[in-house]
Image: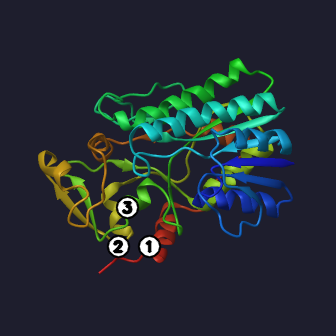
């Protein structure tokens, strides 16, 4: 099977590419970021450009794993919108034009938003909420919804939308890992939301399994039971710093604390927990790392800074 991975130079995307290569797939990666000495065929191009379309045309992949979206922590403003929505539109248009059989969009469970009126467990049919409070999430939500529309717009293309919970592991990749990187983890005083996360290697297994089983639809992907943020921080060897909400936004990004947009404060107050039963039923996925093993993998790679 020939698999093309937009966003291939990302930490988890590299792991996906290497796993597929080890399993005998012919893997092609594209990314505007470099991947020096890549052990796969790799092209340093922007997925929105004509050069990326030429790669689709020449390689004729059977499957595409779209991992080229970015968060507000990585890219600000209008550029992020163009990457997420414009890039997703391009990937699906190329996939349809050049005979791709299966397209996997790798999204995030933060699609659902966090707020006081949100349900405790989100099913795949739940709409996105609280975008008015967290506009930096809107482009990722738009990309997710665009990918989901391919299910009925392009019936000849098997489409899978994965909404992955937070990732954690030895690469330190992802929003939760970035938040835990410092010595102190700020929390909103009076709140201790549940956080749901997966070991990076389980994320890789879930994506590779998706390519094998080829389920059509939108699926939440999660692993072990969620834990309160304070427990996650404690197990990672960090100290918790409760901060009154009215001064929290002024402290973020200063004094060694992580930098978050103001809209992300709701994610430090309210949980985003997903029901992942449909994905397990469709693919047979089972996580290999429990919550303590996952946190330990991160802590061993990123000991507490002194």
Determine the CA span between mark 1 and mark 3. Answer: 11 Å
Q: Which mark is residue 299?
A: 1
- Disc 3 on helix, strand or loop? helix
Q: Tell me the quarter of the picture where residue 212 sits.
A: top right
Discs 1, 2 touching: Cβ within 8 Å: yes
Q: Residues within 10 Å of mark 3 (few under 14, many from 20)?
A: many
State if disc 2 and disc 3 touch (CB < 8 Å): no
Residue 39 image position (x, y, % from top left):
76, 67
Give the mark nearest the N terminus, 1 or 3.
3
| Residue in front for this viewpoint, 53 or 288 | 53
Instruction: Give the residue pinned by disc 3.
Output: 232
- Which badge, 3 or 2, comes first in the chain's sequence? 3
Q: Nearer the viewer, residue 5 or 291?
A: 5
Residue at image location 78% in from the left, 57% down from the top: 20
Dot placed on the residue nearer the N-terminal end, 1 or 2: 2
**Image-based side of 217 in relation to 262, left or right:** right
Residue 1 position, x and y percent, is 87, 48
């Amino acid at each position: 099977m020939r698999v093309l991975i937009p966003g291939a130079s990302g930490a988890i995307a590299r792991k996906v590419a290497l796993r597929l290569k080890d399993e005998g797939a012919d893997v092609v990666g594209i990314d505007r970021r470099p991947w020096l000495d890549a052990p796969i065929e790799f092209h340093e191009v922007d997925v929105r450009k004509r050069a990326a379309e030429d790669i689709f045309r020449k390689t004729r992949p059977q499957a595409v794993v779209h991992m080229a979206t970015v968060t507000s922590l990585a890219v600000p403003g209008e550029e992020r919108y163009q990457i997420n929505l414009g890039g997703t539109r391009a990937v699906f248009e190329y996939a349809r034009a050049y005979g791709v059989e299966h397209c996997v969009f790798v999204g995030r469970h933060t699609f659902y938003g966090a707020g006081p009126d949100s349900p405790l467990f989100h099913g795949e049919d739940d709409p996105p909420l609280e975008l008015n409070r967290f506009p930096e999430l809107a482009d990722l939500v738009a990309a997710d919804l665009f990918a989901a529309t391919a299910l009925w717009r392009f019936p000849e293309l098997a489409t899978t939308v994965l909404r992955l919970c937070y990732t954690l592991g030895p690469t330190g990749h992802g929003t939760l890992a970035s938040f835990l990187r410092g010595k102190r983890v700020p929390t909103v005083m009076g709140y201790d939301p549940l956080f749901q996360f997966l070991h990076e290697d389980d994320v890789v297994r879930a994506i590779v399994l998706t390519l094998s089983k080829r389920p059509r639809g939108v699926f939440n992907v999660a692993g072990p039971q969620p834990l309160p943020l304070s427990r996650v921080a404690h197990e990672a060897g960090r100290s918790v710093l409760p901060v009154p909400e009215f001064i929290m936004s002024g402290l973020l990004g200063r004094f060694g604390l992580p930098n978050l947009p103001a809209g992300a404060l709701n994610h430090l107050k309210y949980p985003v927990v997903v029901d992942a039963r449909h994905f397990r039923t469709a693919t047979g996925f089972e996580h290999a790392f429990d919550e303590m093993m996952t946190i330990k993998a991160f802590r061993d790679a990123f000991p507490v800074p002194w």
